[in-house]
Amino acid sequence: MPAYAVIGGQWGDEGKGKVIDYLAGEVDSVVRYAGGNNAGHTVVNEQGEFQLHLVPSGICWPDVDGIIGNGVVVDPDVLLGEMEMLQKRGIDTGKLHISERAHVIMPYHVMLDALEEQARGSGAIGTTGRGIGPAYVDKTGRDGIRVGDLLDWDSLAPKLKTVLERKNQVITKIYEGEALSLDDVKDRCRRWAEQLRPYARPTEQIVQDRLADGKRVLLEGAQGTLLDLDHGSYPYVTSSSPSIGGACTGLGLNPQAIKGVLGVFKAYSTRVGGGPMPSEMDEATAERIREIAQEYGTTTGRARRIGWFDGVAARYSQLVNGFTGLVLTRLDILDGFESVKICVGYRADGQEVSRFPANTSLLSRCEPVYEELPGWDEPTASATKLCQLPASAVTYVRRIEELVGCKVQIVSTGPSRAETIQLSPVFD
Ligand code: IMP
C-alpha cells in the first residue's frame, strides 16, 4: 500500500494533530519526518486531550505504531517525558520506533539557541528556544550526535569530549555564557542510551517493510511550508524541511511510494515568531479570533499573530507540495463575522506581485489585495455534513479551493475527531 502525507500549508499550527488523529484509524503507522519538539500537536479524542511534541499523533490508536524518522531532531528528555505521560494515561508506547539516524538535541544546542537569538537583537527569528536550529547546524556541519551514537559508548565518549570543548569555547568566548560540564553531559547521554535503546531501530527499513506488506503509512508533517528552510520566508523559518521533499529525505522513502499529499490550512492564517505576514489583521480583529480560538502556541504559550487566509501564499504552498487534496481547519472560528476577507494578491512599490516572493524585504513590503465575502451567522461548529454549513461558509470554502487550485477533502469544525466533514475519501 502507498504512503500518504499530511503537510502544513501555512506557518504551522494548522491543526495537523487533529487531522492525523482523525485519519490514523485507517492506517497502520504514523511517521514523523522533520522538526523536533518545536512542534506542538494537540489531539482530542475519547481518552482526553494530549499535547504531543515528538511522539507521532496516531499513537492513541491501539493498532497504530509511531515512527520517528531520521529527519527529526530528538531531545531525549522531552521524548522520554512524553512517553511517560502517555504510559501513565494508558497509551502503549511499546509501538514506538526511533531512527538510529535521528540527531540528538544536546544541552549545548538548547543553550546556543537562546544565546544566538539574543545576539540577533532586533533581527531575532523568534525561535522556540528548543535547540532545533543549532542541532540541525551540527547535523549539516557533521558534528552531530545521533541516536545510534548514544548506543556506542566507546566511539561516543571521545567525540563528546572534542565537540563539547569546541562548543564551550563558543559559549564562553563569544557569548560569555557558562561552560557545560563534560561529566554532566556524559551522564545524561548514558541515561538516554539506556532508556532509548529498546526503541532505536533502522526506521527506513521498517517503513519500507510496512509498505511492502500492504500496510498504509501516514507521514506526519510538523510546522508548515512557509517555515521550510528552503521554501519559507527565509531567514524567518525553521531549520528543517516541513514540505513534501523533507518526507523523502527525512525517512529514506522514495517519492513513488507517496500516493497522496494532503495540505492542511486554517480557514485564516496564524504565525508565531518574527517575519513578514502580508495578510496580518488589525489587532482588534486578531484579538477577537485569538480569544475565540485560543491562538496561543502549544509549545511556547506565545500569542500567535493572526491574518486572513492568504491565497497567494497558499497557491505557492500548492506549487511546492503538489497537494492532492486540502483540509480546511477551524472554519467554526469565523462563525459570526459579518464578512470574511481572503487575500487574493499582493502589491508592493506600486506594482502587482504575482508570486510569493523569495526576497524577505520585498515580502515585508507586500500589501494584501483583499476580496471580501459575506460572513455567516449560523454556526458551522461541530457540523459533520456539508449540507449543515450555511451557504456563505460553503462559498468561502469553494473560493479557497479555486484560489489554491485543489479540492477540499476534509473540513474540520471543532477540535475533536467527530467534528469533521469528510467530502471525499482520502485513501484509495
Ligand atoms: P525554531 O524551529 O524553534 O528554530 O523556530 C524558528 C521559527 O519557526 C520561529 O518563528 C518559530 O516560532 C517557528 N516555529 C517552529 N515550530 C513551529 C510550530 O510547530 N508551529 C509554528 N511555528 C513554529
Image (cartoon, rainbow, N blue to C red):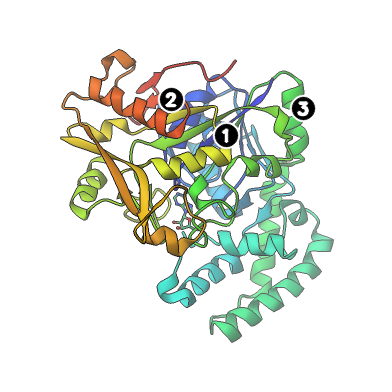
Residue 241 coordinates in the image, percent (x, y): 60, 49
For label 3, the SS is helix
Identify the amino acid type marked 2.
Val
The C terminus - image quarter? top right
In the foreground, 363 or 263: 363
Whether the residues at callouts 2 and 1 have beta carbons within 8 Å, the answer is no
Going 70% across and 77% down the picture, which residue do you hit?
166
* Picture layout, residue 112 above or below residue 173: above
Neighbour tally class for label 2: few under 14, some 14-19, many 20 plus, Cα within 10 Å: many
Q: Which residue is mark 2?
A: 408
Badge 2 or badge 1: first in the primary sequence: 1
Identify the amino acid type marked 1.
Gly
Q: Which residue is mark 3?
A: 209
Quadrant housing residue 269:
top left
Going 56% across and 19% down the picture, which residue do you hit?
26
Badge 1 or badge 3: first in the primary sequence: 3
Q: Which residue is mark 1?
A: 322
